[in-house]
Image (cartoon, helix red, strand yellow):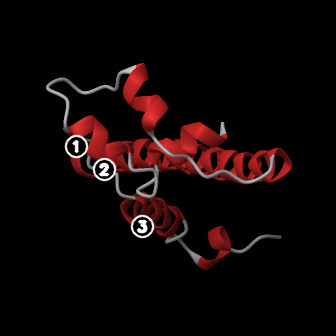
Amino acid sequence: MFYYYLFGSPYSGMSTIVQQCAQAGIRGSELGKLPVLYPPIETQREIARLLSAYDDLIENNRRRMALLEQAAQLLYEEWFVRFRFPATSARASSMAFRKAGSGSSSETCLH
């Protein structure tokens, strides 16, 4: 895992080697020439664990964003395609309640 993140970072020097190739990639002989400074294995594991946790958080946020996008699309469809506004529904039901209770005072009072 450590090398995965290292080679993806701007500090690895990997991009200069890959850009020299006609096709994106790197030969094993070129990779062997690449000087790599690395910390002790326990530090590498800790770095990989932290970066993996960040990757998990990023993926979780991507899923949340997808759900929010879906909710926004459904809300848009409900309001602007089907024209079902929440305020309209509440207003219509309160108007129906007033019409039902607009009779004589004996009808609207509860005994």
Measuring from the top left, give residue 89's x and y in whole percent.
Answer: 42, 57
Extreme-bottom residue of the structure: 105
Image x and y of residue 48, in percent = 71, 46
The mark found on residue 81 in the picture is 1
Give the amino acid at mark 2: Tyr
In the rendered structure, find residue 76 and report the number of the disc placed on it: 2
Q: Above or below — where is 76 with respect to 88?
A: above
CA neighbours of label 2 inside 10 A, class few (<14), some (14 to 19), many (20+): some
Quick one: label 1 or label 3, which is nearer the N terminus?
1
What residue is disc 3 on? 91
Task: Tell me the residue at 40%/23% (across/down).
Answer: 29
Type of amino acid at the residue the image marks with label 1:
Val
Task: Give the percent coordinates (x, y) of residue 38.
Answer: 66, 51
Say which of 60 and 108 sits in front.
Answer: 60
Q: Point out the frontmost of discs 1 and 3.
A: 1
Secondary structure under badge 2?
helix
The mark lying in front, picked from 1 and 2, is 2
Q: How far apart are marks 1 and 3 (CA)?
A: 20 Å
Q: Residue at x 36, y 62 (%)?
A: 88
* Structural distance between the alpha carbons of marks 2 and 3: 20 Å
- The quarter of the image holding the C terminus is bottom right
Going from N to C along the chain, the mark reached first, 2 or 3, is 2
Q: Is residue 17 above or below residue 83?
A: above
Cβ atoms under marks 2 and 3 closer than 8 Å: no
Q: Residue drawn 77% across and 70% down?
A: 110
Q: What's under tag 3, amino acid-wise?
A: Arg
Left or right: 77 with respect to 87? left
User: Looking at the figure, which quarter contains the N terminus?
Assistant: top right
CA separation in Å, label 1 and label 2? 7 Å
